[in-house]
Image (cartoon, helix red, strand yellow):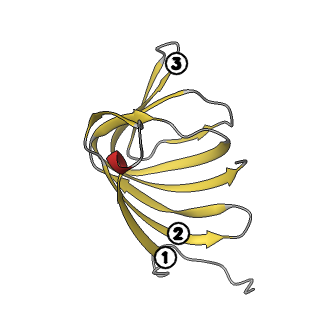
């Protein structure tokens, strides 16, 4: 394995696309489509993600750090607490979070995920 620094701007990553509605019972509103470029996958996953508008059940069993490059999204906890995130915001979703992603405007983020599943 290389120990070279990975520049997200110049590294093409491993691209993938999916329609979130293809995952059973995940989408609550809209028809969000995701594009992901994975730049690093070695015990943690790091990359860039874009989603079109929609609302879905958040994935659990992971810690996820996010930095919003562009757009507007919300995280809504199961108790209804809503946090808005826009361009330049950074946040961490801890393992065990239960709630929803709500993408209001197409959103692009950099992410780092430690998966526990």
Report helix, strand or loop for mark 1: strand
Give percent across and percent down for residue 44: 69, 61
Real-space Cα separation, disc 2 to disc 1, in angstroms: 5 Å
- Name the residue beneath numbered marker 2: 38
- Crowd band around label 1 with a 10 angstrom C-alpha radius: few (<14), some (14–19), many (20+): few
Residue at point 50%, 36% (across, down): 58
Residue 3 seen in this snapshot: yes
Locate residue 106 relative to residue 25 in the image: left or right: left
Dot 2 and dot 1 residues touching (CB under 8 Å): yes
Which one is in front, 4 or 79? Answer: 79
- Name the residue beneath numbered marker 3: 78
Q: Which quadrant, please, contains the N terminus?
A: bottom right
Query: Total label count?
Result: 3
Residue 104 seen in this snapshot: no
Give percent across and percent down for residue 21: 33, 46
Which one is in front, 26 or 77? Answer: 26
Real-space Cα separation, disc 2 to disc 3, in angstroms: 29 Å
Mark 2 / mark 1, whichever is N-terminal: 1
């Amino acid at each position: 394995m290389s120990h070279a620094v990975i520049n997200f701007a110049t590294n093409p990553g491993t691209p993938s696309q999916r329609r979130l509605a293809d995952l059973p019972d995940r989408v609550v509103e809209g028809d969000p489509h995701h594009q992901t470029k994975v730049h690093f996958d070695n015990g943690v996953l790091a990359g860039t993600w874009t989603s079109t508008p929609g609302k879905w059940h958040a994935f659990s069993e992971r810690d996820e750090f996010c930095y919003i490059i562009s757009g507007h999204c919300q995280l809504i906890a199961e108790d209804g607490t809503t946090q808005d995130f826009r361009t330049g915001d950074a946040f961490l979703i801890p393992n065990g979070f239960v709630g929803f992603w709500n993408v209001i405007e197409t959103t692009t983020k950099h992410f780092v995920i430690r998966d526990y599943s």
